[in-house]
Amino acid sequence: MGDRRKDQAERMARYAHLIEQQTRKAVRPFRADGYVNLLNRYGTQQDTTERYRYQAEPMVPDELLTMYYEGNGLFAKIIDTPAEEAIKHGFHLEGLKDQRVEDFFNEALDELDWEETAMTAIRWARLFGGSIAVMLINDGRGLEEPLDWRNIRSIDDIRVYDWSVIQPEEWSMFSYDPQDPFRTRESRLGMPERYHVSSRYGSFVVHDSRCLRERLKGYEATRKTPDDLLRQMATPFENDPFSMVWAAFKNLYPDKECEVFWDQHQKDEHEEEYGFANFPTNGSTPQVFVFAEHPVTVQTETFAHELAHVAVGPEHEHDEVWEAAFDAIFKEYNRLGDLRFAKPEEEETAEGGVSQA
């Protein structure tokens, strides 16, 4: 039996050598399954079927899409027809048993020109990849605040904005607050809490509870300019402490903004380089500088230290208010760390002791 196997192995090696000689470029080691075809070069280095690769196509600019929609009848029909078909039979409000209540809702929708608004939202979603319909609701709160469902007095208007002028508030997509039922609903996972709408006519921030979303696509980098990508770069490190400090800061102080920079030349009053927060006298966005040559543990604490200054403002210089903010950021940082990284489990050793896994 041993001699027979040896003979088979030698024969296979000989066949492999012959194939390599005939094709001159055998890419794969000889295989017993026999998937080599010398006529069409399948399984060799000249096998054209192995040359396929994926290459992403560039996104069509929004300006070009607008030009096609306005100047090409067939293109516009492809965009418009599904929207018109979806709305042409009107709406039916389910769960309403009282005809008077249903008539009231239908009349209110007519006053808001809801059918045309819904068609516009679908059109822009098909053309630009997504849209939101912002409801201008009189509930005593601002657009950027959660809707007060119990205090709605009226819906004054509904305005549609396409994806090209919408920027989701990405930092809130995975925020977790057990005291806030809006942000911890399972359906909210991966969804932003607010949207920034910017156009040539002005800009504003609107809370998601005041929006009707129509196929708003993820938060794709393909819809962002290179400058947007630079401003919103995600860390490649799974355990990046700086991103966790920043997340803790934004969870606690979502309305506070600042620009953060590494720096190599900053010294405090003791001639020690750590970092500092700068508050421009013209009222523009504060800036945080962190010295780049200290260990990560020091830099992390320095970052939280300076963010606490941003949170409370320049009028609180290491006082009790600042200290409370720093402690809150530190506590939230630890909470996020516990959520993201499971604590190592203790395992009993063979001697009956305990060791860290």
Image (cartoon, helix red, strand yellow):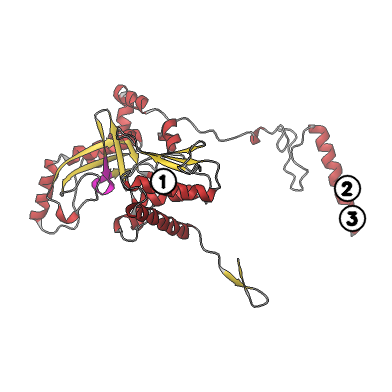
Q: Return the x and y of residue 350 as percentages of the image width and height.
A: 67, 75
Name the mark nearer the viewer: 2 or 1.
1
CB atoms of marks 2 and 3 within 8 Å:
no
Residue 191 vertical placement versus 97 (above, below): above
What residue type is disc 2 on?
Glu
Extreme-left residue of the structure: 100
How far apart are the two marked residues, 3 and 1, measured between alpha carbons? 77 Å
What residue type is disc 1 on?
Glu
Q: Can residue 6 be seen in this snapshot?
A: yes
Picture residue at 48% right of the left edge, 31% below the top:
57
Q: Return the x and y of residue 330 as percentages of the image width and height.
A: 42, 55
Q: Return the x and y of residue 230 as percentages of the image width and height.
A: 45, 35
Helix, strand or loop at disc 1? Answer: helix
Q: Is the magenta stretch mostly helix, strand or loop?
A: strand
| Foreground of the two, 299 or 205 | 299
Q: Return the x and y of residue 78 as percentages of the image width and height.
A: 33, 32
Query: In this picture, which residue range is highlighted in magenta?
Result: 205-212
What residue type is disc 3 on?
Arg
Q: Can residue 173 be seen in this snapshot?
A: no
Give the side of residue 50 with respect to residue 10, left or right. Answer: left
Q: Is 354 contained in the magenta span?
A: no
Mark nearer the N terminus (3 vs 1): 3
Give the side of residue 127 with respect to residue 116, left or right. Answer: right
How far apart are the two marked residues, 2 and 1, measured between alpha carbons? 72 Å
How far apart are the two marked residues, 2 and 3, measured between alpha carbons? 10 Å
Residue that badge 1 annotates: 306
Residue 10, numbered label: 2
Residue that badge 3 annotates: 4
Mark nearer the N terminus (2 vs 1): 2
Residue 252 vertical placement versus 116 (above, below): below
